[in-house]
Image (cartoon, rainbow, N blue to C red):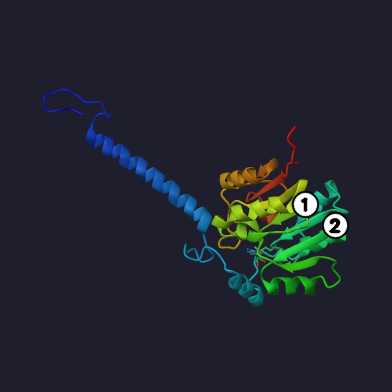
Amino acid sequence: MIKPDGSQTSLAQSPRCLNLFQLVWVGKVMEKLILSDQIAYNSPTGNREVAVLAPEDWEQRWREGTTSWDLGGVTPSLVEYCREKNPRGLDVLVPGCGRGYDAHFLARQGARVVALDYAPAALEAARTTHPESRVDWQIADVTVLDFKHRFDLVWEYTCFCALDPPRRQAYLAGVARALRPGGHYQGLVFHSFPKSGGPPWPVDVENFRDLLATNLAIVAFEENTQRSLKARLNTEIWFSARKLPVVPPS
Ligand SMILES: C[S@@+](CC[C@H](N)C(=O)[O-])C[C@H]1O[C@@H](n2cnc3c(N)ncnc32)[C@H](O)[C@@H]1O
């Protein structure tokens, strides 16, 4: 910039240019904030105010049958996982179980399964769909998990992404409490939409990785995993995280 006396200032010294830089910087920060906000709070209607479904909203969805996330069967990656690691004899927790295909499948493989949902109509649907099931269906809010019993495996599918983002840490802390040392929290989470609308809502990848690492030890983390079913390819993270054994002080 040319000063009145003919001398020049560098861009960094110029108050006007500094303001311009600041504006660009503020613009970039705002853009980031808006983008991350959209990721966290996108809603079924595209309006930001309907970010989260309250228990009664989930209940209503189940009663109306607006359950577009429901695959109508077991999650294929769970079948694959059970071929790799036989769950027979394991204590398994399935949070946000919906109609319960995964929970019932795990029970049929010989696992002792507790499945949770806070919509009574979801559990009604699960019981009706699997009348002979040995699954222990329980109404519970997964963001306040407090079991005396400990589990070897917590199976995740479309529960984390159904939660209000500020409550996701409480959920993962509860998952960590519910696991036995050496137990695994395992499954898939969405990081982007399989189609427009929700639920489920996508998950910010780095935020999910941080939350996992805060509560457990990450064993696997595959973004855009090939384990997704075809219609959901490039939208999911396959992960595994382990509760570390407590090492007694020497
Ligand atoms: C997107 S659905 C997924 C259901 C099932 N996992 C599936 O893939 O078909 C999410 C489920 O979690 C339940 N849910 C949402 N928030 C919950 C909470 N805080 N505690 C317990 N269940 C919850 C809903 O009622 C719904 O059945």
Indicate the position of residue 98 as horizontal and vertical percent values: 71, 66
Q: How many marks?
A: 2
Which amino acid lies under the numbered mark 1 shown in the image of this protein?
A: Leu
Tell me, yes or no, whether the two marked residues, 2 and 1, touch with CB atoms within 8 Å: yes
Residue appearing at x 77%, y 55% in the figure: 76
Indicate the position of residue 210 as horizontal and vertical percent values: 59, 44
Residue appearing at x 73%, y 71% in the figure: 123
Label drawn at residue 153: 1
Residue appearing at x 85%, y 49% in the figure: 83
Label drawn at residue 111: 2
Q: Earlier in the sequence, mark 2 or mark 1?
A: 2
Q: Residue furthest front?
A: 250
Quadrant assignment for the N terminus: top left
Q: CA distance from mark 2 to mark 1?
A: 10 Å
Indicate the position of residue 8 as horizontal and vertical percent values: 19, 24
Asked which secondary structure carries label 1, the reply is: strand
Quick check: can you spot residue 125?
A: yes
Indicate the position of residue 167 as horizontal and vertical percent values: 57, 57
Residue 120 placement: quadrant: bottom right
Closest to the observer: 1 or 148? 148
Query: Image check: 208 left or right of 23?
Result: right
Query: Image check: 233 left or right of 136?
Result: left
249 over 72 or under it: above or below: above
Which amino acid lies under the numbered mark 2 shown in the image of this protein?
A: Ala
Mark 2 nearby-residue class (10 Å; few <14, some 14–19, many ≥20): many
Query: Image check: 182 left or right of 202?
Result: right
Label drawn at residue 83: none
Q: Residue furthest top?
A: 7
